[in-house]
Image (cartoon, rainbow, N blue to C red):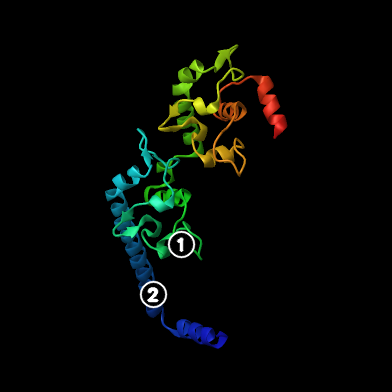
Amino acid sequence: MRHIQQRFAKTIYSADSDEIVEYEKDLLQNNLNKKVLREYEKGQYHNVLLQNMDKLIDVGLIISDDGKYYFHNFAGNSQWPKIEGKSLKNFPNAEFLRKYGIIDQSAESMKSRNQVEKLFEVFLGSEAVATEEDYKKLFTSQLREIIPELEKIGLEFREEKYYFNNLQGVKKGPKIAGRNLISFPNMEFLRKHGILKTHQHVMTNHNQLATLFHVLGFPIDERLLEKIQNEK
């Protein structure tokens, strides 16, 4: 191998300057052509994705008023639609998904909504996909909308804080953003912020709901907050 490299180097260095310039130009043009082809291919896939956006909305994709894409309600991969005759799991193809770091090098297809988020970031830019802060703002707004309903079943607001002592069972809570309060906003968020343990799927008590209020920036009873934090 080293002998071949030395011979190649000798050939280059023995060539006249015009030949070297032509070689470099050809190399540059070849790389440029590949880049143009890649961008064209990426643009084609982008267009296909946009043309099938209604299918993605049907399985939970949300497009906000500011044009950002939210995936917190996106369905599990068994419900993902077909795009161009193939499952979204494999769109556009394994090679593309690996190249952009959407799936691991050993993987064949997407499995989670987080990977679909990454796919959107590749096509539309990271600024088009909701951030953690965007999600919190959305969830805060949605929770605020149902507070009057929660007050009807015992939630109290006094001294600029929320109290949960007299709140009836969490299961009796109103629907919020089309889902039951006990699973709002989703299992992933609830586990990430320590509201649910890894084996739990829904909230079952006042303390968990109070923790959700706290995570989303609502002031809650300090004694209850201290108790919750001590139990962790």
Q: Considering depth in this image, is 124 or 92 the residue closer to the camera?
A: 92
Q: Residue at the top extreme?
A: 159
How far across and how far down the image is residue 65, in percent?
35, 32
Q: Residue at x 51, y 32 (%)?
A: 182
- Between marks 2 and 1 in the image, the one whose residue lies nearer the viewer: 1
Residue 209 found in image quarter: top right
Question: Where residue 25 sits in the image (x, y, percent)?
Answer: 36, 72
Q: Amino acid at mark 2?
A: Val
Q: Earlier in the sequence, mark 2 or mark 1?
A: 2
The residue under the point 70% across, 25% down is 226
154 vs 121, left or right, is right
- The kind of residue on which mark 1 rests is Arg
Position of the C terminus, as image quadrant, is top right
Position of 187 relative to 50 (above/below): above
x and y percentages locating residue 164 in the rendered image: 59, 20
User: Disc 1 marks which residue?
Assistant: 98
Against 23, residue 48 (above or below) is: above
Q: Compared to 182, does 198 lie above or below?
A: below
- Residue sitting at 54 percent across and 17 percent down? 154
Count up the numbered dots: 2
Q: Which residue is mark 2?
A: 21
Measured in 3D between alpha carbons, the distance from the residue under mark 2 to the one under mark 1, in whole angstroms, is 35 Å
Front residue of 174 and 29? 174
